[in-house]
Amino acid sequence: NAGVMQNPRHLVRRRGQEARLRCSPMKGHSHVYWYRQLPEEGLKFMVYLQKENIIDESGMPKERFSAEFPKEGPSILRIQQVVRGDSAAYFCASSPPGGTMNTEAFFGQGTRLTVV
Amino acid sequence: AQSVAQPEDQVKVAEGNPLTVKCTYSVSGNPYLFWYVQYPNRGLQFLLKYITGDNLVKGSYGFEAEFNKSQTSFHLKKPSALVSDSALYFCAVRDRNGNTGKLIFGQGTTLQVKP
C-alpha cells in the first residue's frame, strides 16, 4: 500500500509564474489536507478537502491560492503569480473516511517550492 | 484561540540518557494529541497519539508520552536515547469538538543525541 505521494519533490518557479503541487492520498483515503511549512517554523494548516468538496479553507491565503480534489486524480494545490514569500515546503496529508477525528493523518514527503 | 507550544527549540542529550521533549496546548475541551517526527528533507512520520484512557501512551521506536490534563501538557519521552533519534519533533492537537480534522502544530523541537 503506497503512502501519500506528492510530486514534484522540488519545484523552482520564477516570480509571477504558476506553481502546481500534486498529492495522491493513500489508497482508500478520501480526506486530504494541505499544510505549509515555512523555514524554521511548524506546519500551518491551509485547506481540508474531500472528494470534489472543499470542507475547510480557513488557512488558505485569500488570493492566488486554490485547491481541488477531483473525483478522479490527485489533489492539486495551485499558486498563481508566485512571490518569494511563497517559498516553503508544502505537505499533503490524508486520512481514511469516517474516522477523521481520532485517526492519525499520514503525510507525504512534501514539495519544496523555491521562488527565484 | 487554539495553540500548541513547544518551549524548547532544541534539546540535546547524550546517547543512552533519557530524553523529554515538552509540549503544552491550549484547546477548548479535551483534544486529541499527536506527536510526529521529521527527518531532514522528509515528511512527517506519526509517533503516537492520545485519544482517551490511560494517560501514558506508548508509540513507535520506544517513545511514549504522558497526557496531563491539569497542566495541559503532552510531553514526549524516551528512557534511553539513540543517535538515530536525532530529528525534528512536532506536537499537534486536534479539537475534539471541531468539524474538521485539521491539526494545529507546535513550532517543533530539534532533538540532538550525541554519541
Image (cartoon, coloured by chain):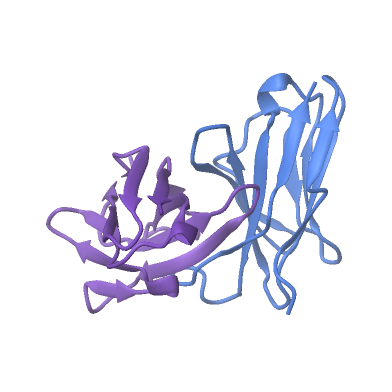
Chain colours: A blue, B purple
Q: Is residue A26 visible?
A: yes
Which residue appears at 27% of the width and 52% of the height?
B28
Query: For the view shown, which residue lies furthest in the left direction?
Result: B70
Residue at coordinates 50% horizontally, 65% vertically from top-left? B46
User: What percent of the width, then of the height, locates residue A8?
Assistant: 83, 48
Residue A38 appears at what percent x and percent y?
A: 58, 33
Above or below residue A26? Residue A6 is above
With respect to residue A44, does A53 lie above or below?
below
Q: Total number of numbered labels?
A: 0
A7 relative position to B104: left or right: right
Quadrant of image for the N terminus of chain B: top left
Q: Position of residue A23 (x, y in %)?
A: 76, 56
Instruction: Write down the quadrant of residue B67 in the picture.
Output: bottom left
User: In the shown orientation, is residue A46 left or right of residue B11?
Assistant: right
Q: Residue at x 71, y 20 (%)?
A: A84
Q: Quadrant of the C terminus of chain B?
A: bottom left
Query: Looking at this view, is A92 or B102 the one in front?
Result: A92
Task: Give the camera-side residue of A31 and B11.
Answer: B11
Instruction: From the viewer's perspective, tell me whether residue B58 is left or right of residue A41.
Output: left
One can see residue B26 in this view: no
Image point 41% across, 60% down: which residue? B35
Percent x, y of residue A27: 73, 76
Q: Nearer the viewer, residue A103 or B23?
A: B23
Describe residue A20's horizontal placement relative to residue A53 as left or right.
right
